[in-house]
Amino acid sequence: MLRERFHYILDWLNYLLRYRFTAISDTMIVWEAAENSKMNDKIRTLYDQLVKDDAYRSFYFVWAMDNPEDYFSLMKNHHTMLVRKNTSDYYRTYAQARFWIHDCDLEKFIRPGKNQIDIRYRGDSQEDREIFDYLSAREHTPSLLEKFVRYSKKMLNRAHLILLIIKYNILGFFRTHGLFHNNNSLRLAKLKNCHQGKRCFLIGNGPSLTGADLDLLQDEYTFGTNMVYKIFDQTEWRPSYHCISDSIYASKLGQELSKKVKAPLFTTERTYRRMRNKPFDTTYVHTLQSERYKVRGNIQAYCMVKATVLSLAAEMAFHMGFKEIYLLGVDCTNPHAKGGHFTDNYTTKEVAETDIHRIKTRMKASTLTTDQIGAHIIDRSMEVYHLLDEYATKHGIHIYNATRGGNLEIFPRVKLEEVLGIEEEEK
């Protein structure tokens, strides 16, 4: 009895701590069903309705369970997570979620705040309509405590960023002098100037990319990016190297990537950690997530990745000593508009919607048109290309744009056939 009381007090303190220092998320719902009820009944039916409704694709759905390992299949659904009851993650979820939907009793100390909505679900149609009304008006005015928590987290993130910069610079200094290497940094060191003075092609995934153009590059050094493997059925070409920097792509399409990509893969450490299936020859670089993009020039320390995977590909090309870099399929068009890639099946709806949600969060806007999202992506990409051009010019590296059409005019335009010494009629 005394032991149970002690654990109860610990759980209460755990929840109180989370409740006091966690900001509420208007797009999070926590679900919990009674142990003796079948989750596939009414509460599961409501969950399935929301998961399939495009209006709630920006939501996070968290199921609280005694045995989450028995329900891993739920994680195939968009933005669904599982937490074990009576754990720190469990209490954090209840403190953070704006909406609580459950058909069972909660611990007495788990009480909703004034901006949280607690729904004891019975499963009748009238209640369903009320829930949808609640969800449609989900934004709340944050309290002073929430504002303080968010500000504190912002300051802590900045402090963490500064510490990472110091750490990576120190490591980079020693590793450029042959010290404190691990297997990954040794691979990076061996790549330094391994193609000194040569040329390469960075392959984007814009609508202008064709299998016929890629066939012309079979004897060239090339960097494929993201899901370029979806054009493999149209060409004999395969990239010399492959780059992926987006953790969303890696976590959602990692298995497909590992099966299709046989070239050495370059990625960021954060993305590498999120890949369940990693290609055998994978090298990661330390990166910093910051809107203040800058070309560092020492990838053995860290690099900054922003807006486009081409920034990572270009910096790897700099590191490997390439002096002529040609862009192909880099259209700088809206990737979320129809015809934004070389194929309409370039990515899944789930991945696209996750990316859109990330952009809305970054822009602090709940509703954006496809054109607005596209303009945001293009503006950020153009900023990166300007900075890459400045760095290349200072270091005697020449970057050209061999893309057929598109909106990228920062780099000098060249014709692919002229670069390769091929007469157009022979193509």
Image (cartoon, rainbow, N blue to C red):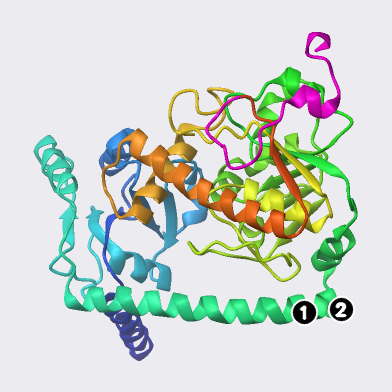
Q: Nearer the viewer, residue 151 or 172?
A: 172
In the rendered image, which quarter is residue 143 located in? bottom left
Q: Residue 173 carries which label?
A: 1
384 to 162, vertically: above or below? above
Label 1 Cα crowd, 10 Å radius (few <14 / some 14-19 / many 20+): some
Please name the residue shown 74% across and 67% down the image.
298
Magenta stretch containing residue 401, yes or no? no
Looking at the image, residue 252 sits to the left or right of residue 230; the answer is: left
Image: magenta residue range: 405-427
User: How many numbered marks appear?
Assistant: 2
Q: Which mark is residue 177?
A: 2
Label 1 vs label 2: CA separation?
7 Å
Looking at the image, residue 196 sits to the left or right of residue 248; the answer is: right
Q: Where is residue 285 in the image (x, y as percent from the top left)?
A: 70, 62
Secondary structure mainly formed by the magenta segment: loop
Q: Position of residue 123 (x, y in %)?
A: 18, 41
Looking at the image, residue 367 sits to the left or right of residue 82; the answer is: left
* Residue 72 visible in the current orientation: no
Looking at the image, residue 320 sits to the left or right of residue 165; the answer is: right
Q: Are marks 1 and 2 in contact (CB under 8 Å)?
A: yes
Please name the residue shown 52% across and 47% down the image.
381
Kind of residue indicated by mark 2: His
Kind of residue indicated by mark 1: Phe
Q: Which of 208 and 323 is in front in this view?
A: 323
Please name the residue shown 65% across and 29% down the image.
403
Q: Nearer the viewer, residue 192 or 120?
A: 192
Q: Position of residue 214 (x, y in %)?
A: 76, 25
> In the structure shown, which secondary structural element does the residue marked by tag 2 occupy?
loop
Please name the residue shown 80% across and 12% down the image.
427
